[in-house]
Image (tube, rainbow, N blue to C red):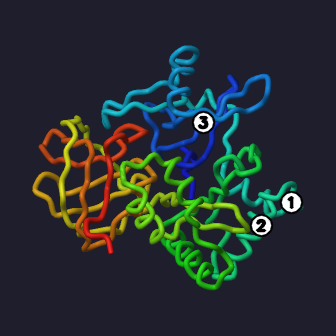
């Protein structure tokens, strides 16, 4: 699953001697660095989670060497040289550790129960991992469970398992208050009803014993599309188009092939719009138009982490 030369995958965490933990966001090295975003900072009180604005300010003031601008993608994120990494937190290893232990807290007990339920629907735990706060043992009361599924086949099998377990009343779908909390955290450009309509049909999140969990896919090496083109941003555009291929809708980034004369492809770098549309549906997209040297363009949602003013939505939701 992991490459020997570059064993870092999205949803891994990497830790530095400076007391910084970054979430990996890229499959490939960037000038021999790991593409990532700062998530946790260690101070006298322990590990503290930070938002994007705080992370950028902290790095700009104290560790500018971790700020990075990709010329290829014309995008800013964080990047850490491999020799600056003091610890590599791997989701699949941590999940095995948490499953083999006697539960240390209620969230770990719920995780163990959740995995047992998914195994009832023939999920292979060797294709699974745990990320988020549980990856570094920083979960608190109210924390979510963030599962990682490795490979497209296993991921869609897990989505189906979640759907079946909800139907069998072993899991619960998000109620309105859960969805409201999800909506506020995502800061979506869609109104609440539209956001909820899209979310409920994805089956990539549900509730176990009052705790929300989420499943996210990480591609296997053979599933990756290597991007060598250099893109330049051409401003924000809004289009309507039909989805003609949704096979990579749950990838990171999510990719939708569309029938539009401006661009053949819509890409989402924000998790809010992963799995947002299905083949044959008419969608409206607002995002940053990016073009390569040949003039081939793509429309990118999530050109900034907050993705203000950018969205994907199905037209004529039923």
Element type at marker 1? Answer: loop
Task: State the image quarter where residue 51 is shown.
Answer: top right
Percent across and percent down for residue 317 are 31, 70
Q: How many marks?
A: 3
Q: Earlier in the sequence, mark 2 or mark 1?
A: 1
Relative to residue 19, is residue 314 drawn left or right? left
Q: Which mark is residue 39?
A: 3
Q: Quadrant of residue 209?
A: bottom right
Q: CA distance from mark 1 to mark 3?
A: 25 Å
Q: Where is residue 288 drawn, in percent x and y?
A: 25, 42
- Choose the circle earlier in sequence order: 3 or 2: 3
Is residue 102 shown above or below 26?
A: below
Residue at the (12%, 52%) spot, across then down:
262
Say which element carries label 2: helix
Q: Disc 1 marks which residue?
A: 103
Crowd band around label 3 with a 10 angstrom C-alpha radius: few (<14), some (14–19), many (20+): many
Please report the residue visible at 79 percent of the width from the left and 22 percent of the height from the top. Answer: 44
In the rendered image, the residue lying farthest to the bottom is 168
Q: Nearer the viewer, residue 113 or 311?
A: 311
Q: Specify the label residue 112 is tagged with.
A: 2
The relative height of residue 83 versus residue 6 in the rendered view (above or below) is above
Q: Nearer the viewer, residue 53 or 5?
A: 53
Percent x, y of residue 2 = 57, 53
Q: CA distance from mark 2 to mark 1?
A: 8 Å
- The quadrant of the image that shows the C terminus is bottom left
Q: Residues within 10 Å of mark 2 (few under 14, many from 20)?
A: some
Residue 104 position by quadrant = bottom right
Expressed as whole percent of the image width and height from the top left, the position of residue 145 reads: 67, 57
Mark 2 in CB contact with mark 1 (< 8 angstroms): yes
Q: Label 3, label 2: how many angstroms apart (C-alpha)?
A: 25 Å
Left/right placement of residue 51 relative to residue 119 reads left
């Amino acid at each position: 699953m992991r490459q020997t030369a570059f064993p870092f995958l999205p949803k891994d965490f990497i830790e530095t001697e400076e007391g910084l933990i970054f979430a990996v966001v890229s499959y490939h090295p960037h000038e021999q660095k790991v593409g990532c975003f700062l998530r946790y900072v260690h101070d006298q009180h322990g590990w503290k989670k930070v938002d994007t604005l705080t992370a950028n300010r902290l790095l700009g003031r104290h560790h500018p060497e971790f700020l990075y601008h990709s010329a290829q993608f014309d995008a800013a994120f964080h990047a850490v040289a491999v020799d600056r990494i003091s610890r590599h937190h791997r989701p699949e290893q941590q999940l095995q550790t948490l499953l083999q232990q006697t539960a240390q807290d209620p969230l770990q007990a719920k995780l163990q129960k959740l995995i047992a339920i998914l195994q009832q629907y023939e999920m292979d735990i060797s294709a699974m991992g745990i990320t988020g706060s549980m990856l570094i043992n920083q979960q608190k009361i109210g924390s979510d469970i963030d599962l990682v599924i490795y490979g497209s086949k296993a991921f869609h099998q897990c989505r189906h398992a979640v759907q079946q377990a909800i139907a069998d009343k072993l899991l619960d779908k998000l109620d309105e208050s859960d969805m409201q909390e999800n909506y506020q955290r995502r800061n979506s450009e869609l109104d609440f009803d539209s956001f909820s309509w899209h979310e409920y049909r994805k089956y990539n999140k549900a509730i176990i014993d009052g705790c929300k969990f989420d499943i996210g896919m990480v591609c296997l090496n053979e599933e990756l599309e290597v991007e060598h083109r250099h893109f330049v941003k051409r401003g924000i555009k809004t289009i309507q188009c039909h989805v003609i291929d949704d096979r990579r809708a749950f990838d990171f980034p999510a990719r939708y092939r569309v029938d539009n004369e401006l661009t053949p492809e819509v890409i989402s770098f924000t998790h809010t719009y992963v799995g947002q549309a299905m083949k044959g549906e008419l969608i409206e997209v607002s995002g940053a138009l990016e073009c390569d040297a040949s003039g081939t363009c793509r429309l990118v949602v999530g050109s900034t982490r907050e993705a203000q003013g950018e969205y994907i939505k199905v037209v004529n939701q039923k």
